[in-house]
Amino acid sequence: QLVQSTFFPPAEGVMLPTGSFSNRVAFITGGGTGLGRAMTSTLSQLGAQCVIASRKLDVLQQTAEEISSQTGNKVHAVECDVRDPQAVARCVERMETLTGLPDVIINNAAGNFVCPSERLSPNAWRSITDIVLNGTAFVTLELGKRLIQSRKGASFLAITTIYAESGSGFVVPSASAKAGVEALYKSLAAEWGRYGHRFNIIQPGPIRTKGAFSRLDPTGAFEKAMISRIPTGRLGKPAEIANLAAFVSSDYATWMSGAVIRLDGGEYVSMAGEFNELRRVTPDQWKMMEAMIRNTRGS
Ligand SMILES: CCCCC/C=C\C=C\C(=O)SCCNC(=O)CCNC(=O)[C@H](O)C(C)(C)COP(=O)(O)OP(=O)(O)OC[C@H]1O[C@@H](n2cnc3c(N)ncnc32)[C@H](O)[C@@H]1OP(=O)(O)O
Ligand SMILES: NC(=O)C1=CN([C@@H]2O[C@H](COP(=O)(O)OP(=O)(O)OC[C@H]3O[C@@H](n4cnc5c(N)ncnc54)[C@H](OP(=O)(O)O)[C@@H]3O)[C@@H](O)[C@H]2O)C=CC1
């Protein structure tokens, strides 16, 4: 952490009023681990009945039991590989039996690893883009069609990343798929408002989770450099994403649709600005540089 991080301590308590999601059902893909788990915990604390879905049923069940016992609200675990549209349909059928159709859908499941693009096999490309873009599309279309049929409105949220906008080397399948997810959600925000559906996007900056850090910084060599370019001087916390996701999915945000919200401690703009490296110039160096610049007057 950098010294300035003391100005920006994370508030990790639940932000919205108790009961904000009473009588609501939330469906969270990848809800067994990392950020998905944090979002499930927050929504459950706020009164939602949650359904979490991913490939590893044992992980889902453990998370579901832990959160349910803490909050007193039921969390259901449903096995689902989002790459398989038939598995998604079966998962949604199971959810309809357990809870009915959801009010809140969070497309959070993802796959990623750092790899020079010249080393990527077609299957490596497919494995990431299938989870991230096709998986989000299958979940969104399956639920969207059923919700439209039932004339029920819902809030859809996709978790992308700051480099969905800029692109990034070494995570090219992820960057391409996340950009596709953003196009999907912005497009549906325009098309499906008439059915009572909202679509929004959160782009997190770096937040320590086992899933992300083990695949994107396996040696730990890049963490210091990452923190040094974040103006708020620290990584994000899962609870910070969870509070934002809860707000975006809540009745306090019913006028929000098609929004792309970056939550990254300022990392994106810090990396983008042409002259931001001048942060390293000392006061003495500035004195000298200013004198040199002023000297150019009239030249
Ligand atoms: C520290 C940075 C913070 C900032 C973070 C910013 C953005 C973060 C975005 C994220 O999405 S983080 C979330 C990360 N979480 C996960 O990835 C969890 C799920 N991931 C997985 O299950 C696996 O990692 C995988 C590979 C995505 C999917 O698993 P599976 O379906 O079992 O695939 P396979 O193991 O069969 O592999 C398929 C294919 O891919 C090739 N491959 C796998 N790993 C690598 C690698 N490291 N480098 C190159 N290629 C790889 C593998 O060889 C297979 O291809 P073949 O041609 O050999 O069949
Ligand atoms: N942590 C960070 O710094 C950042 C994270 N993000 C995004 O946040 C989200 C959560 O990431 P994070 O919590 O860090 O990482 P995790 O690895 O913990 O989360 C990924 C989740 O996706 C699930 N998943 C993967 N493949 C599939 C599949 N085929 N079908 C269903 N579920 C699947 C995994 O469960 P299982 O293995 O059981 O299938 C896992 O629970 C992702 O969208 C990621 O891109 C974005 C920017 C930064």
Image (cartoon, rainbow, N blue to C red):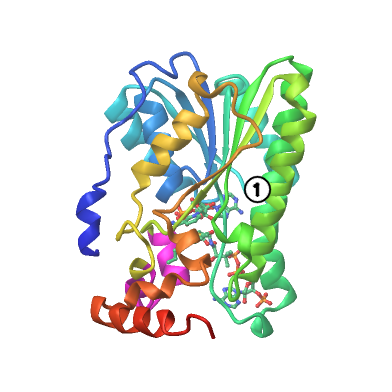
Quarter of the view holding residue 124: bottom right
Question: Is 76 or 249 nearer to us in this picture?
Answer: 249
- From the Cβ of disc 1, is ligand 2 less than 8 Å away? yes
One can see residue 38 in this view:
yes
* Left-right relation of 79 to 290: right
Residue 87 sits above or below residue 205 on the image: above
Q: Residue furthest front?
A: 298
- The quadrant the N terminus occupies is bottom left
Can you identify the residue that label 1 sits on?
82
Q: Residue 101: x and y, percent?
A: 63, 22
Does the rendering let one see residue 84?
no
Determine the main secondary structure of the stretch shown in magenta: helix
Ligand 1 image position (quadrant): bottom right
Let me know if residue 222 is in the magenta part.
Answer: yes
The residue sitting at 27% across, 78% down in the picture is 282
The residues colored magenta run: 210-226
Label 1 residue SS: loop
Residue 273 position in % (x across, y down) = 51, 66
Residue type, numbered disc 1? Val
Quarter holding residue 119? bottom right
The residue closer to the viewer here, 260 or 289, is 289
Above or below, comparing residue 216 to residue 133 in the picture: below
Please name the residue shown 63% across and 49% down the image. 81
Quarter holding the C terminus is bottom right
Q: Is residue 11 above or below residue 145?
A: below
